[in-house]
Amino acid sequence: MFICAQLDERGICFTVSVLPNPINAQSVVPIETFDERLLGKKYAGGVFYGLEAQVSHNTVQVFWRDLKGNLVADTEQVKARYGSTEIPINMVNGQGSFKVQADPGTYRIEIISSSGCRTEVEVTV
């Protein structure tokens, strides 16, 4: 059995497979176990990682983290979107933050990198 993650042209995992035979392709990464947590994660430098966010009141902290919870110092551009508002997030050493300044209410905020990694959080203002 050959267990692998397949990456798109941006290095984002879009499928995890168990195959009868190995595939030798640049977009295929052999992995030890079938792990759906890899879906949507970025692969670089031999590590899968993605965006995570934590909310405290109207402040959102954003992190690049690997599957073990370690910070990854990715320099890729990241932004937050809610409604028609887009906020660039200044990521330094794998982390950044921003404040949601909006009318009172609950907002679903999409946090997305230029390669397509994403996460979502809800913020109540």
Image: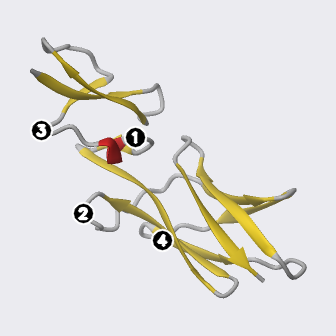
Q: What residue type is labelled 4?
A: Gln
Q: Earlier in the sequence, mark 2 or mark 1?
A: 1
Element type where label 2 sits in the image = loop
Coloration mode: secondary structure
**Alpha carbons under labels 3 and 4: distance apart:** 29 Å
> Which numbered tag is attached to residue 68?
2
Mark sitting on residue 39: 1
Question: In the rendered structure, which disc, 3 or 2, sits on the residue that comes first in sequence?
Answer: 3
Q: Position of residue 81 (x, y in %)?
A: 74, 58
Q: Name the residue under label 3.
A: 32
Q: Nearer the N terminus, badge 3 or badge 4?
A: 3
Report the Cα–Cα distance between label 1 and label 3.
15 Å
46 is higher (above) or lower (below) than 108 = above
Outermost residue on the bottom side: it is: 57
Figure quadrant of the N terminus = top left
Direction left: furthest residue: 1
Tag 4 residue: 95
Residues at marks 1 and 4 touching, judged by CB atoms closer than 8 Å? no
- Which amino acid type is shown beneath numbered disc 2? Lys
> 71 or 123, which is in the foreground?
123
Q: How far apart are marks 2 and 4 (CA)?
A: 16 Å
Disc 3 residue type (three-letter)? Glu
